[in-house]
Image: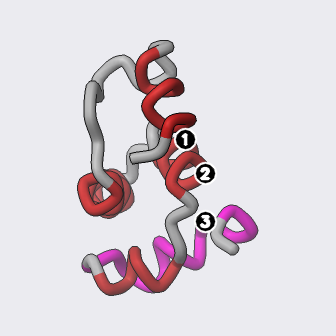
């Protein structure tokens, strides 16, 4: 994890996570998409630069990923 991500997590932007790997972030986003919760999706996707392909490979539905629209590059 890079310095900026560690600093962001340390500053409390994501109080629930002390250390978070990219693969854990992808899993959290997929779980949130399946539940329909949007509270952490945008923050995690932008913080880690998660792509649509990663989400689809992790088990997210095509419709849920497509619904994120322009957020995914």
Q: Of circles 3 and 2, which is in front?
A: 2
| Badge 3 or badge 2: first in the primary sequence | 2
Spatial separation of the CA atoms under disc 3 and disc 1:
12 Å
Residue found at x 60% / y 51%: 46
Q: Residue 22 lies in magenta, yes or no?
A: no
Spatial separation of the CA atoms under disc 3 and disc 2:
12 Å
The residue to which callout 2 is attached is 46
Question: What SS does tag 3 mark?
Answer: loop
Q: Of circles 3 and 1, which is in front?
A: 1
- Residue 41 at x, y = what percent? 48, 48
Q: Residues within 10 Å of mark 3 (few under 14, many from 20)?
A: some
Rendered image quadrant of residue 19: top left
User: In this orientation, which residue lies closer to the viewer: 43 or 20?
Assistant: 20
Question: What SS does tag 1 mark?
Answer: helix
- Range shown magenta: 59-71
User: In this orientation, which residue lies closer to the viewer: 58 or 23?
Assistant: 23
Q: Residues within 10 Å of mark 1 (few under 14, many from 20)?
A: some
| Badge 3 or badge 1: first in the primary sequence | 1
Residue 56 is left or right of residue 16, and the answer is right
- Residue 42 at x, y = what percent? 57, 47
Residue found at x 75% / y 68%: 70
Residue found at x 36% / y 18%: 15
Question: What SS does tag 2 mark?
Answer: helix
Residue found at x 33% / y 53%: 25
The residue to which callout 3 is attached is 68
Rendered image quadrant of residue 33: bottom left
């Amino acid at each position: 994890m890079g310095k900026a991500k560690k600093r962001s997590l340390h500053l409390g932007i994501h109080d629930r996570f002390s250390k978070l790997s990219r693969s854990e972030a992808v899993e959290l986003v997929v779980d949130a998409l399946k539940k329909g919760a949007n509270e952490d999706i945008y923050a995690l996707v932008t913080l880690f630069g998660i792509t649509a392909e990663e989400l689809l490979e992790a088990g997210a539905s095509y419709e849920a990923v497509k619904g994120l629209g322009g957020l995914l590059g």
